Amino acid sequence: MCSDSTHRIAIVGAGIAGLACARVLDAGGLSVTLFDKARGVGGRMSSRRLPDAVLDLGAQFFSVRDATFRRAMESWRNAGAIAPWPTSMWSAESGSWQRHDDDLERLCGTPSMSAVTRHLANGLAVKAETRIEHLEGSAGQWQLVDEHGERHGPFTGVVLATPSPQAHALVASQDQSLAATCETVIQRPCWTAWALFDDPLPALPDVDDDWQAVRLNDSRLRFVVRNQLKPGRQHQGESLSLLANLAWSEARLEDSEETVVEALLDAFQQALPAGTRLPAPSALGAHRWRYAQPDVFAGGEAVNLDYRLSASGLALCGDGWRGPRVEDAWLSGHHLGEALVAKFT
Ligand SMILES: Cc1cc2nc3c(=O)[nH]c(=O)nc-3n(C[C@H](O)[C@H](O)[C@H](O)COP(=O)(O)OP(=O)(O)OC[C@H]3O[C@@H](n4cnc5c(N)ncnc54)[C@H](O)[C@@H]3O)c2cc1C
């Protein structure tokens, strides 16, 4: 229970950015409530749970460059929420497969990518399945109105931790300057297909049997991941995530799921060495990410605002303000959290 003098902050969006911000606010003694339209937390780090498999359809792994993010990552590793992955990465072009070795440390959630965001959400107040449709009020007295017309508030500050077009829809009537900032960041779409197989994939000549991921040089498909070879998922059978190219996704945004799955599986078949055939899938599907990746170079120069905080207590954070990776989204939310604690305590 918070006292009357405690500042209350609402965060719209319980992806990694909103959760990073919430953790700092909570540690700083502010009262925080997260709202998300989805059934759970995670946003683009969420995973699809099927009866026999867990599939990561958004972020597949994350890398670590920043020292502050590294400290957070170490605590998630100690809590068992993440593990190194992939350890067997390949690249393929016209049926020729090469091992892809570099020095970049990559990690993923265990037993699913959403383990990271579930870990971060522990102990926080999260209102799931609550789509915020508009904001009302003014500085220090913000109300959030959801899709059923229910009002939540008042809040001293409101953080919009969503892709820029979704933040724009909420700030447009309240803050012209923040709305204009939202217009500077384009979020590009991405289709991800998935396929389950009763039989394992065929062995590929001169490639590890346990290859985990392959990058493709193809106009349709850019990345294929074997979910059952991610840490903590040994129980599941052959289960692929197939991530489409962004330009191809843009052109096919309104295509049906069936058309997309067929095209991406065909692209993967074409990428296999001659003479190897994919077995028949036992289940298929696709997920359309309408706002998958910020084009931070859309205006010619890289946008790196980190976050935005207005005098009225409205704020923006997320990957759109920093860069297209999990690490960028986390840093944006974390830095905004620090700025809000400094402003309100
Ligand atoms: C296919 C794909 C592959 C990727 N691969 C990688 C990768 O391998 N490595 C990497 O580092 N990054 C990757 N990324 C990028 C990474 O996933 C994102 O940068 C990061 O997850 C963004 O986090 P976020 O918190 O800023 O936004 P999000 O995760 O999008 O969170 C925003 C949240 O806001 C909620 N929301 C939106 N509007 C409303 C509203 N009106 N009311 C309530 N809730 C709302 C949404 O439901 C969502 O949960 C990938 C992304 C995609 C889509």
Image (cartoon, grey):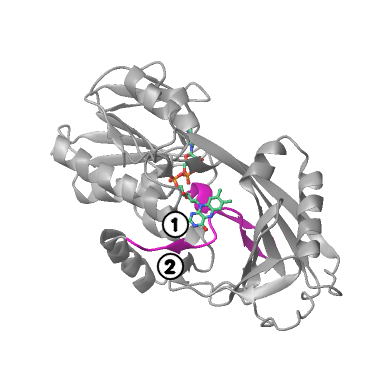
Q: Disc 2, ligand 1: is the CB inside 8 Å?
A: no
| 76 displayed left or right of 55 | left
Residue contact between numbered discs 1 and 2, judged by CB atoms under 8 Å: yes
Question: The N terminus lies in which quarter of the figure?
Answer: top left
**Residue at 34% from the left image edge and 39% from the top image edge:** 33
| 14 displayed left or right of 72 | right
Q: In the rendered structure, which amino acid carries the disc numbered 1? A: Arg
- Of 194 and 89, nearer the camera is 89
Quadrant in the picture for residue 78: bottom left
Q: Please state the horizontal and vertical placement of residue 102, each as a whole percent of the image.
A: 48, 73
Vertical side of 25 occupied by 198: above or below: below
Circle 2 SS class: loop
Quadrant in the picture for residue 206: bottom right
Residue 81 disc label: 2
Q: Is residue 280 magenta?
A: no
Vertical side of 188 occupied by 108: above or below: below
**Residue at 42% from the left image edge and 28% from the top image edge:** 182
**Residue at 38% from the left image edge and 71% from the top image edge:** 77
Other residues around mark 1 within 10 Å, as few (<14) / some (14–19) / many (≥20): some
Residue 64 disc label: none
Quadrant in the picture for residue 302: top left
Q: Which residues are magenta?
A: 41-65
Q: Disc 1, ligand 1: is the CB inside 8 Å?
A: no
Residue highlighted by disc 1: 118
Question: Is residue 175 visible to the viewer in this orientation of the structure?
Answer: no
Q: Is residue 54 magenta?
A: yes
Circle 1 SS class: helix
Vertical side of 277 occupied by 296: above or below: above
